[in-house]
Amino acid sequence: MIKLIEIVTLFSDKTRTRILFLHWHKKLCNCDIENVLNITQSNISKYMKKAELLNIAKNTKDKYRAY
């Protein structure tokens, strides 16, 4: 039940939902999402970390970028 509440909370914000949509469907790196949505990479990373902890998304990294 608590996990369900955390998932609903994660998707309650329009920006977070857009970040996850771009991450899932477009396979954009965080720097590209930053340019599309005009938000900071630190916020994107924070939202993605929450999604990873809830097993909703998986963040992969190469040398310089996170996807």
Image (tube, rainbow, N blue to C red):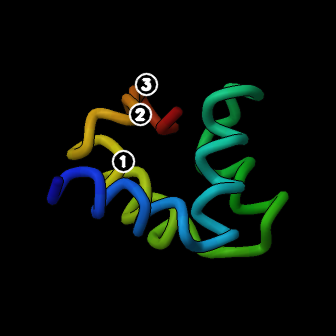
Q: CA distance from mark 2 to mark 3?
A: 17 Å
| Label 1: which secondary element | helix
Identified by mark 1, the residue type is: Ala
**Residue 39's x, y, as percent?**
67, 75
Between 7 and 28, the one nearer to me in the picture: 7
Neighbour class for label 1 at 10 Å: few (<14), some, many (≥20)? many
Q: CA distance from mark 3 to mark 1?
A: 19 Å
At horizontal 63% and vertical 29% (from top left) the residue drawn is 24
Front label number (2 vs 3): 2
Q: Which mark is residue 62?
A: 3
Q: Is residue 39 left or right of residue 47?
A: right
Compared with 60, 53 (above or below) is below
Q: Is residue 3 left or right of residue 17?
A: left
| Label 2: which secondary element | loop
- Give residue 37's quadrant in the image: bottom right
**Residue 57's x, y, as percent?**
41, 33
Identified by mark 2, the residue type is: Ala
- Give residue 47's quadrant in the image: bottom left
Residue at mark 1: 51
- Give residue 29's quadrant in the image: top right
Compared with 51, 67 (above or below) is above
| Label 3: which secondary element | loop
Query: Is tag 2's residue or tag 3's residue first in the polypeptide sequence?
Result: 2
Q: Which mark is residue 9?
A: none
At horizontal 51% and vertical 37% (from top left) the residue drawn is 65
**Residue 64's x, y, as percent?**
47, 37
Residue at mark 2: 57
**Residue 44's x, y, as percent?**
52, 62
Identified by mark 3, the residue type is: Asp
